[in-house]
Image: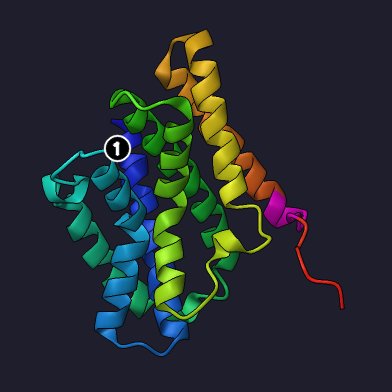
Amino acid sequence: MLLYFLDLFGTVVFAISGVWVACRKDMDLFGALVLAFVTAVGGGTIRDVLLAATPVFWIKDTLYLMVILATVMVAIMGRKWHERSKWIMQVSDALGLAVFVVIGVTKSLSYGMEPMVAIMMGVLTGCGGGAIRDLLAGEIPMVLRKEIYASAAMVGGAVLVFIEPLIQNIDVTSVIAATVVLVLRLLALYKDLSLPCLSLPK
């Protein structure tokens, strides 16, 4: 139940980020709704389709749609506080990423996927929606830039997959994996850490 509420929390945070990108790009209300939707549930939707877990989660549970719609309305009204709440959103986004990764990995394992596939599904769940959002907004997806984001999701997913057989308690391993993702992402933010940037010699 706790993981479900955290999943809804992550949905809210990711939807807000979609709205703020839409505002930054001078989109209309429909554009904000689209970006909020794809950011919040895009990665999980692709995961469920690939796992043949259909109908996908937000069709089974329409509370996700209602949460996204309500979030869009509130986020639009509070968009002037975007810059002042930037750090709060970044921390919340890191927590949302951690939860989505854990959900993606655990769901994949429950469908009998191999460890590497489960890790990929965790990364897709956590980062896929943001990548779609950035593409629709005409930006290079953050997961393709030097920020420690997808890499943090990958490490957290690997931790869950490889320690779960040792501990044999999915609740404990989920908390450990989520903590790893959260700590790596926050360290990257507060210490300005990033992966090496590849460039051609001039």
Q: Nearer the viewer, residue 85 or 152?
A: 152
Quadrant that contains the N terminus: top left
Q: What percent of the width, then of the height, locates residue 89? A: 52, 61
Q: What residue do we see at 42% from left, 33% from top?
A: 118
Q: Is residue 43 visible?
A: yes
Q: What percent of the width, then of the height, locates residue 78? A: 40, 76
Q: Is residue 176 visible?
A: no
Element type at mark 1:
helix
**What residue occupies the far right of the structure in this picture?**
202
Q: What percent of the width, then of the height, locates residue 159? A: 57, 27
Seen in the picture, residue 107 relative to 19 is either above or below; the reply is above
Q: What percent of the width, then of the height, locates residue 182? A: 58, 42
Seen in the picture, residue 175 relative to 103 is either above or below; the reply is above
Magenta stretch holds residue 192:
yes
**What residue occupies the far front of the structure in this picture?**
201
Q: Nearer the viewer, residue 53 or 83?
A: 53
Q: What span is in magenta? A: 188-195
Seen in the picture, residue 90 relative to 117 is either above or below; the reply is below
Drawn side of residue 157 relative to residue 9, left or right: right
Q: Nearer the viewer, residue 8 or 43?
A: 43
Using a 10 Å C-alpha cutoff, classify the residue at mark 1 as few (fewer than 14 neighbours), some (14 to 19) or many (20 or more): few
Q: What residue do we see at 53% from left, 9% from top?
A: 166
Drawn side of residue 16 relative to residue 181, left or right: left
Report the residue marked by disc 1.
Answer: 4
Magenta stretch holds residue 114:
no
